[in-house]
Amino acid sequence: MSGDVVFDFARAERIGLSEAVFCAGKTPQQIAAILQSASQRAGLLLTRLDAEKFAALSGELKAATEWCPLSQTAFFGPVPPVSLAGNVAIVAAGTSDAPAAREAERTLRHAGVEASVFIDVGVAGLWRLMDRIEEIRRFPVVVAVAGMDAALASVLGGLYSGSLICVPTSVGYGAAEQGRTALNAMLASCAPGLLVTNIDNGYGAACAALRMLGVMNLR
Amino acid sequence: MSGDVVFDFARAERIGLSEAVFCAGKTPQQIAAILQSASQRAGLLLTRLDAEKFAALSGELKAATEWCPLSQTAFFGPVPPVSLAGNVAIVAAGTSDAPAAREAERTLRHAGVEASVFIDVGVAGLWRLMDRIEEIRRFPVVVAVAGMDAALASVLGGLYSGSLICVPTSVGYGAAEQGRTALNAMLASCAPGLLVTNIDNGYGAACAALRMLGVMNLR
Amino acid sequence: MSGDVVFDFARAERIGLSEAVFCAGKTPQQIAAILQSASQRAGLLLTRLDAEKFAALSGELKAATEWCPLSQTAFFGPVPPVSLAGNVAIVAAGTSDAPAAREAERTLRHAGVEASVFIDVGVAGLWRLMDRIEEIRRFPVVVAVAGMDAALASVLGGLYSGSLICVPTSVGYGAAEQGRTALNAMLASCAPGLLVTNIDNGYGAACAALRMLGVMNLR
Amino acid sequence: MSGDVVFDFARAERIGLSEAVFCAGKTPQQIAAILQSASQRAGLLLTRLDAEKFAALSGELKAATEWCPLSQTAFFGPVPPVSLAGNVAIVAAGTSDAPAAREAERTLRHAGVEASVFIDVGVAGLWRLMDRIEEIRRFPVVVAVAGMDAALASVLGGLYSGSLICVPTSVGYGAAEQGRTALNAMLASCAPGLLVTNIDNGYGAACAALRMLGVMNLR
Amino acid sequence: MSGDVVFDFARAERIGLSEAVFCAGKTPQQIAAILQSASQRAGLLLTRLDAEKFAALSGELKAATEWCPLSQTAFFGPVPPVSLAGNVAIVAAGTSDAPAAREAERTLRHAGVEASVFIDVGVAGLWRLMDRIEEIRRFPVVVAVAGMDAALASVLGGLYSGSLICVPTSVGYGAAEQGRTALNAMLASCAPGLLVTNIDNGYGAACAALRMLGVMNLR
Amino acid sequence: MSGDVVFDFARAERIGLSEAVFCAGKTPQQIAAILQSASQRAGLLLTRLDAEKFAALSGELKAATEWCPLSQTAFFGPVPPVSLAGNVAIVAAGTSDAPAAREAERTLRHAGVEASVFIDVGVAGLWRLMDRIEEIRRFPVVVAVAGMDAALASVLGGLYSGSLICVPTSVGYGAAEQGRTALNAMLASCAPGLLVTNIDNGYGAACAALRMLGVMNLR
Amino acid sequence: MSGDVVFDFARAERIGLSEAVFCAGKTPQQIAAILQSASQRAGLLLTRLDAEKFAALSGELKAATEWCPLSQTAFFGPVPPVSLAGNVAIVAAGTSDAPAAREAERTLRHAGVEASVFIDVGVAGLWRLMDRIEEIRRFPVVVAVAGMDAALASVLGGLYSGSLICVPTSVGYGAAEQGRTALNAMLASCAPGLLVTNIDNGYGAACAALRMLGVMNLR
Amino acid sequence: MSGDVVFDFARAERIGLSEAVFCAGKTPQQIAAILQSASQRAGLLLTRLDAEKFAALSGELKAATEWCPLSQTAFFGPVPPVSLAGNVAIVAAGTSDAPAAREAERTLRHAGVEASVFIDVGVAGLWRLMDRIEEIRRFPVVVAVAGMDAALASVLGGLYSGSLICVPTSVGYGAAEQGRTALNAMLASCAPGLLVTNIDNGYGAACAALRMLGVMNLR
């Protein structure tokens, strides 16, 4: 089964987003083959690269790869300098939501966009959000990351007028249903105009933010 | 199948709650038979008595029955005077949550307890709750009624220190999943110590409040 | 239960979106009461107002209400003139998806935004989409409406670089699971950066588009 | 991502419950950072701290932490003396339900409340419950812990008149659906006025009991 | 599509149970055709024949059909005399469970077996079951019918040593999930050796009882 | 929203199947508009056209439409003569499965293919299938239609060597889960090489059969 | 939490079944404590005792325990001699169903009942069942064990007239849904009078068989 | 439990497909026993044989077994020469779908059929499919393998006229629901005549293709 990988090099031109490698369903051998076939000059983003798979890479590939254990993302090859800051805020309800928040932050960073991150502003202690809300309101795009009941999204949706991208996380147990409850609560929010990604999909939220920045001529 | 109904007359003595008649799964004939076999003196609460079933009762039974179309509850026979007020607040997110809120209010009233009701304080417009929160905090027991994302429960749980009984409602569509999302969000709330009833179960929330008032020696 | 309705008049100032009345869980009496308490000058949007509930309004209220049977939306009071066109495209897979598409169109129109609508461009006949794709690409914001397998969203996501708001619909039967399959397929799309609303939620998609236009200083 | 943790120190004053650290979604590094930033004087409760994560703590942190393997809870720093006993009974259906029962017991103990625990009183052998029921009836608050069919909750609900907090557990297999069946059975109980927490949520049940004790002026 | 019906006349000889006509998915025309093609002498049992379909039959067919509105069953043609009594008890938790209980009773009666029926012995009022348990214990086969939490099945399973056939019913709302919770609770019961039928399947429970009576040489 | 309908006239040339009109999600007005815009000469198949919608058509459109109430399909305009017979057998477990079986038969007939239909050969009376199995084996393509447990599909899959297209139906109640159980049982069959369509999708099964006949050069 | 275990010694007298220890939710320490507190003379059955937990027992306890790795059951203490044979047949569809079949066989053996076992008679190769059906018909009680589509149960239900206890197994993947499909297919079987246990519950099937043998005066 | 395995040697004659050994639910001991009892001359296909189970085979059995780690299939004994090529194309959306695609390829190869494989033609980069579509159209049978949203199936269904067998895969996370979303999307596809197998069931797709080739007289 040689020649399995068909890179979508035209993607960046077509939709403004580079192709990324989703590693969850791939063997270490497949990942290594992809990296070897990709030109290091292009700069490739890898997502869902867990510790075991990263460890299985050869020393050479490891050296060319900047890996982040919290978000399980990696930069292979060069990363562009920051070209844009102050446009995207990432707001997370609790420390446990950090992996998804960080995946969004890293994906934006790989595209040259620096996001501002606000962690631990869940609404069970409403003052934590209220303390930061004026600051948050200055960003045209906000990525809200929350698990369990995801109440942060609804409260934020009633206080903030810009584009609100919601990332449900799989944080919680039992009735949290691996993030399904947070996902449904965001979709059925009493606040109008919230948009939602897949569970734990920080990467997708970042891509959506990049699409928005693109149409705002900020990229 | 005569003699199908076995009244649990000892219930009030045993657990402090009178038996109520849940009409949803019963034919009009069965309901009429139950009313006829019950002594009017006792005073019976009926729940889930819809307009069609109420209309099917004989004129005599109708006359002895005080029916509320919004909550689909009915009082059959005498209702005790109000013996207690100022201990239970019922807080509902929106107008669509009124049926369940009203079912709780009527069940409490049937036991002689007058509740205070706060409707339309959902957190999409946070100021609506904040305007009333000091007033709400004075009640030892609060029944919170909300559908869709049920974010009201979590916000209230972080602002209020008393006993918080949460009633998810079937308000919403699609990802609201007939109230399952509100139920799960309340169960998985980021605020600690929330307690939850079945979907749309205003009756059960009132019974739980009555249990609490009982142990507080307020009944 | 008088005084149940607490209008969130400050919403427009706070988040740039006027309050709308979701009629699905309300009785005709509650809807009439809301309309009577609202000032006609403000101009109110009603969603999920079905034929039966519209018919139950008094002649006076009916006369002040412009009702659309396809989308089950109504404009109560004055509607602002069109202030913006050419920024939002609504793209629907089939005729059966028209109600949700139309709900989005009407919500935008109520805010002064005129959308362009493309119906029946589902990917089972790929040429129908390809014929219009160049035209669609000119819009900064696209609302994609599709039920069943929702494959339109993924194909569009690979061809279009702007902001893509996806509305799953409940069109289909059996494994379509009342729109749950379209919802999940959009969330799990192989194309990056798609954002999703609740099932059949044309209203929410329009609100999200309005948030985007706001940050683009187009509103 | 420094400064991720924002302690909600005002929580105890606001809602009468100290903040606890939910460790399930956190890395050992994050947990260590939280412990180090917390003052030992305050006394912190940790939940869902499994053996592996506890083992990963430094010797110093371990020494300051009293860990319970059965309930996977830990006390970090000083624990207040017992200030209240004889008000909360914890009743569990079987030995397999002990972890959740013990989590409730430990959470109460961390707040100075000593609970009485009754294990192995499931209704398949009804005499086991009947032998203890008079004793159980003396407590104003009962926490009922049960998995599988959770029939204990309904039987207890018909025999006991005080406040009944039900904790479904994930004990069982197949149709027990990881505790979902016990949860639903408790929510749909034929006994009136039962209140329910998330699956395996002994911590939440204890917090709810503390709220009740608070309004009873017992704390 | 003539000749659609292929009667399984040999069924009674093969497995000791006559064929019955399940009417739920059939048109009135199909039902009439089946009755006309069946010999009246044989005696046919019809299940799930609702009022509308019964009303649609011709006067002649109606006259030959003994219809029971509560259980929606009908006897077409002659019914054998009672050949056996005192071997099957049908025990139902509440009045709302009567339709399924009655379907079982009628199916047994159509096979010449007279069952004893005990209604309204749900465990929320435990004394109601305890009052009858000695009587119930005398039957070799018990059919237990219950909805909602189905706790009756578990309590009975711990008190009764004979063959226990459990019929979950769709009584209840919300978390009762149309009988799925009762079904799962019976399957996951803490009492050993319970056997379960489909939701509301009184017919199937009766057939299972007939199988048992057959191997006991009582038929 | 004029011009909503974009006919995929090229479909027949592209994939050998004419476009059909799925009426379930469409208003009578939309259906009438589609029929009027379609040329009668082409000959159009309509599926899921229920009695109410058919009745709402104008007299002229009704006259041009051959409607089948059992399968809720209609032929609008001319139907081609039968060009092929003896190649497709439709085998249904019971009379209640007839609507889906008939939808398949009608769809094939609209394409000029005459199918042979075998109804009431469910495996609860195995002899009914065994009586016909030699006859069935002569067809290169078999469509198996079954609801509830769908055991017919597995037994047939072990006895028949040709192409086996399985249509689960929504026949049954409770654990049949509106056809989901039949669908899953067919997908998880112990017999190898079964292929499955959506629930009640006789139309899709017929289209798949037409694809097969096409590659066999029989069309 | 000493004294957690309350043995239900009276169970055998009350319902004719000895108590068994379900080990899945218990720690090795809890299991050891139970064994030590139980008298070896009584003879205890343990279920779901996996290799790891068995290995964790002390040498002494191991020596007193006869463990079966396939069914993960153990006999602790003496086992009664066989008192009954030829009354129960266990029929399993495939080799993968052997663990549940063997759990049933061992539970029966622990009660002195010897069952006959028929493995690999799944209906995908119908002749395998037909070859044995005459032999199977001689048993008054049959336990049918099958996963995936569970078609064996329906076919057997149409060929065998005695008591049929169905055990769905978790064999399969994807649409087999961990045994949920087999469970539902058995519950929704087209054959009448099948009775069903929880998924993989060979123990429960054996207990049900013992109840039947009891009422047949065979025990 | 000796003699558990009953080979269905007649299967090939009866339905044209040899029996394969599904290893997922079997112990290494059971697999070894099956291989030893099978004649090596026949040539046996094993599926779901993971690395651990393969490693547990004896050296002799390993030597006789050609194992493929990607698809977890093995050929035991001789494999027939290729007798047929150019009739089946296997088309997979991405590299992560390769295991199921390869299982199909190996199953076909074991029956003497050589398939052509097209990997990484997912529709997020539509040009990748369009580049190969003319080539794909030449095959009478296509197996389409895709996970997540499975949009490849619908697009292919609109472009290709032959027999289309769709294999959903468990690739993805969150809303992909372990392949359930891909499965449902394929079943509810807007393109007509798609046929679907169980999730990840490359083996079943190959068997279905072999059935088709059989009726085309190509085998």
Image (cartoon, coloured by chain):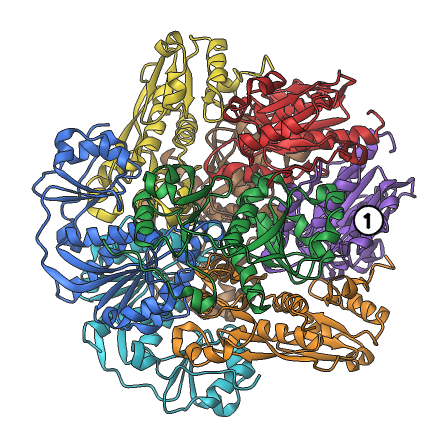
Chain colours: A orange, B blue, C green, D cyan, E yellow, F red, G brown, H purple
H52 with respect to C16 (left or right): right
The quadrant holding residue A7 is bottom right
Looking at the image, residue E41 sits to the left or right of residue C84; the answer is left
Q: What is the secondary structure assignment of the residue under circle 1? A: helix
Q: In the image, what residue occupies the spot 47% across and 87% down? A: D35
Residue that extends furthest to the front in the rendered view of this protein: C81
Q: Position of residue G127 (x, y in %)?
A: 68, 29
Q: What is the quadrant of residue B82 in the picture?
A: bottom left
Q: Nearer the viewer, residue A112 or H86?
A: A112
Q: Which residue is mark 1?
A: H106
At 36% from the left and 22% from the top, the residue drawn is: E51
> For the C terminus of chain E, which image quadrant?
top left
The residue nearer to you, when weighing C85 against A25, is C85
User: Height in image: C172 above or below G3?
Assistant: above
The subunit letter for the residue under badge 1 reads H
Q: Residue at x 32, y 77 (%)?
A: D17
* Residue at the image position 25 percent from the left and 50 percent from the top: B103
Give F57 or E120, whichever is nearer the viewer.
F57
Q: Amino acid at mark 1?
A: Arg
Image: B187 above or below B204: below
x, y (%) of residue F11? 76, 35
Quadrant, the N terminus of chain E: top right
Seen in the image, is G194 located left or right of residue H167?
A: left
Residue G178 can be seen in this image: yes
| x and y, in percent, of residue D71 in the image | 41, 73
Would you call the spot at circle 1 few (<14 residues within 10 Å), some (14-19), or many (20 or more)?
A: many
Q: How many marks?
A: 1
**Residue E194 seen in the figure:** no
User: In the drawing, does residue G190 fall left or right of residue B156?
Assistant: right
Q: Nearer the viewer, residue C114 or G79?
A: C114
